[in-house]
Amino acid sequence: MNILRIIKKNYLLLLVYFFILITFIFYYFNYKKILTSNVNISIKYDNYNENIIDEENKNKYQIVEGIQQKLQKIFDNQQPTNNNLFPKIKKYNFHKGETVYGFTLDINDNIKPFQEGIISEEYDQNQSNTLSISIKGKNNKIFFNKRGEFIGISFPQQSHKMEINYIITSNYIYNFCERMYKKFNNNIKDKKIHNEYESDHESISSFSDSSESLTDEDDDSDFENLKSPQDKIKKQYLIPMELNSNQIENNPKIQLLIKLNKEGKFNGLMQQINNQYIDVSKKFLNTFALSFIDESFFEQSEKLKPSDIIQEDISKIIENISKITFSIEFSRYLGSGFIYAAEKSEKSSYYKYKYYIITNSHVLEPGKNSKIKVYNPYFNSYKDAKIFTFISNNEGFDDIGILTFQDNNATKFKEIEEILKTAFPEPHSFIKPEIQQIVYSMGSQESFALEITNIKNTQSIKRNLLKRGDITKLNEAFIDFNIEIDNGNSGGPVFNQKGQIIGMNRNTINNPATTDKFSQAINILHIQKRLEEIFSQHKQNPKNIGIITDLTSENHKNYLMRKLNSFKKNFNNLKIEHNDEAPMIAFSMDELTVLTHKDPITLPLLKNKENKSKIILKIKLVYTYNQQQILFIDPQKEYMELYARIDSQDKSKINLKIIIKNKNHKVINFIEHSLESHRRSANKDSSFVSLKFIDSNKPSVHTTKQKIMDSLIVWHQDHHIKGNGIIFSKEKTQDNQYLYHVLSTYEDNYENNLISLNNLLYKRIFNDQNEIIIYDSEQEIYKFEQGTINNIFPNENNIILITFKSSENYPVVPFKKTSDLKVGEDIYYLINGDSDDHNPQMFKSQISSIIENKNSTFVFDSVFNLKEKIKDINFICFDHKGNFIGINFFNNSNVDIPSNFIQATLISNNNLRELLITSNLKENLNILISVIFIFLVMIIISIKLNPIINNI
């Protein structure tokens, strides 16, 4: 009876708890349904066919994979194997621009990643000092040519001042071993082996700290006859090699072992004499030091036959650019420059020809009161040079100066004229730099010998060293490329594979928080505009040249007005033919303040066109080198007003306004931007505005590289949350639109973790909308969409899913399986740092190694080292056909990747499934929130009802 009474009094509470239980059961089974449901979205994979790989690449992949496997075998065994493992050592004539294959001799994990580089200097078969190689990073490497033949190994002490790599060549190893073999055989009968070692040359103190850096602690490096060689050999990493000497009777086979220390660095040689290995490391290094004094230290051999010389198509172009590239020397300063123009000297009674060398202002400025000399091996002597002029206005893109020198050689003058016709074709619009175009950089720098030896009579300057890279980003003023130029390279030419000079070396940019470790050149199209003005003014008043301290003079203002009026002149007769360069004009911020001091720059309405052209005016603001904002206007319907004014309160600040008005003069769009402290900055931010007419109906060439850049999705929620992604799936909806699924990286820039978490939860649950930017290169326009972030939290590698709906039919990016990749295959990887604009950096690399593990990850090389970055950086990777191949993972890597390499993997089905599951959970989050809300309401009701029930 009491029990029934209690039940009767509390039946309302029991009912409440029962309802809560039912609700949780419902949610639990709904949750289980999500977990067990088929959440796969169909992924489009590339139809890979190994049979369609061209023969050249197939041969390359086979050579690279073969070398890598042999090196891994050696390091797995940690003892010498068959000496025939690699082709026999030979001597070569090396030429600038020849491609070489490098393999990093990493010790921690035996992956031996592959890289491509180039020879940076001419090198004769009888030279014995270090050879300069342009390749990414300073890892210890072993090098081969394109035929898979050994050509050298990294010198163990790389330069701390320069990015160029230096190697001990096969030429030197060949000459040394041949010489030692002769001496052994000449003295073996007299038992003078040890005496010969010790008396041949005195040990000289040539390499700083060489005893510590070049040998192991347990390696005495004596020149001893090893009675039990295997006991010694097993303690080291040894690479077996063999050579056949054509300078010794019977062409004997000389076998040797290249020694590596515990870090994988070169540690000397062991040479087999009379079937026993002799450690000749100390002798080898002492003799190598002498080669810096006398490059002909070894007796001269017969010249190589032409068939033994590796030549490439680019060699003649490189030779021609070398002929017009000079070192610029005065006091303790060193720079580079190149001939831009040549003319017959009318005023000199002695010299017949005058040459104009362009370089950087910062190269010439310290030499205003110095005696300047320029040198080029083609002219075979130092030339006295004079400063013609240089611009000194602190603008990065105006870091331009001119030198002159004179000469009498008519043959050289004629040849230089021919080279200049190719280097600077007319019209200038024939020079068209493009993203991911292969480029070469040339310049002079200090010799490596000055760093590693205290011998004073070594060559102090290496002239016209060559480096190769790719354009990662460009605009009207600057070209960014992934080559790290060295001190002394400033002012040198940057040229393409046609021999056209597209820019001038300026500086290297390195920011530990971003991907910005690249070099920057001034665009030759901008340089030519500045030179056109300078030479025009000089022609009018030859005596009034000199240092241009600013570009705000009356002459410069008149020049700008003529340029602007010319741009406006045929405005209503504008017609952009298929092969024509679109009309374009650009002004720096200082120039705009001069031009718009009283009135804004305006353009009238364009008259209606009866033809099929659809003309659009593209207005681009570029600031802090790479960030940009872009507006598009229809000149048939809209006006533009452009202002740049010095701030009335702060004279160091420039305020920019771009106002767009319709036919009724109503403002419909505008950009406002303030350049803080611009006018007093010692190094201005090089901001400028460009105006360019484009025909959106004009067909464009859609290259694979452009297709890759177009496939990048850029999004942001605010200035703190952003990412890059690709469309990997789309579905047609009932309302005749498309539902797109985007796989994206995720980045937030909140410095406070608590603020970051609060904002993250709020924006994912209550405000998960974001703005998506997609670029259409065919029409040169940006398209904007509204997307939804589908995951509350990114996964451990900062990956999320985004969806958006649109009537636009965007392409889906196909995937390529990691198992279909080849070591040595070209790939591209992208990142877009500025979330407000679709302006990605695009880098080129090769597959360096494929790691066969659970995720089948791959490794590729990079000009920057992610291990040194202060935050995680994600890249989106594509193969050379534009197929998506992966995103670099910075967590859960079970391999110690060497510096300047990045590990990535294709998103696996499990990764995608996890993201889709959490995405579905987020869609059902309203159930959870409802349950929690109902639970709280019921608890409150039960608490309120309990005293009432008890009183019944």
Image (cartoon, helix red, strand yellow):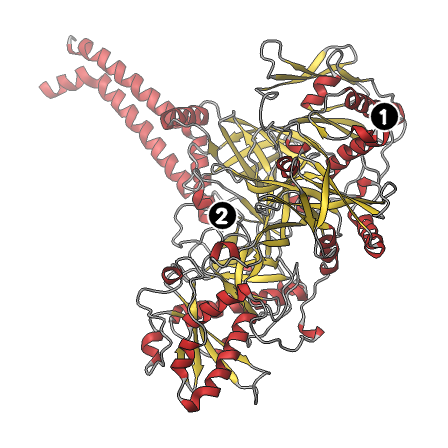
The numbered dot on residue 493 is none
Q: Position of residue 1 (x, y in %)?
A: 9, 19
The amino acid at mark 2 is Ile
* Residue 485 visible in the snapshot: yes
Foreground label between 2 and 1:
1
- Residue 485 vertical position relative to residue 7 in the rendered view, above or below: below
Q: What SS does tag 1 mark?
A: helix
Residues 281 and 78: in front is 281
- Residue 224 vertical position relative to residue 908 in the rendered view, above or below: below
Q: Position of residue 481 (x, y in %)?
A: 62, 44
Are there few (<14), some (14-19), or many (20+) residues within 10 Å of tag 2? many
Q: Position of residue 53 (x, y in %)?
A: 65, 62
Identify the residue at the far left of this view.
2
The amino acid at mark 1 is Ser
The image quarter containing residue 947 is: top left
Q: Give the side of residue 597 with respect to residue 410, left or right.
A: left
The residue that mark 2 highlights is 907
* Residue 86 visible in the snapshot: no
Residues 806 and 560: in front is 560
Q: Position of residue 629 (x, y in %)?
A: 64, 26
Count of numbered badges drawn on the protein = 2
The residue that mark 1 highlights is 566
Quadrant position of the C terminus in the picture: top left
Mark 1 or mark 2, which is nearer the start of the sequence?
Answer: 1
CA distance for labels 2 and 1: 53 Å
The image quarter containing residue 320 is: bottom right
Are there few (<14), some (14-19), or many (20+) residues within 10 Å of tag 1? few
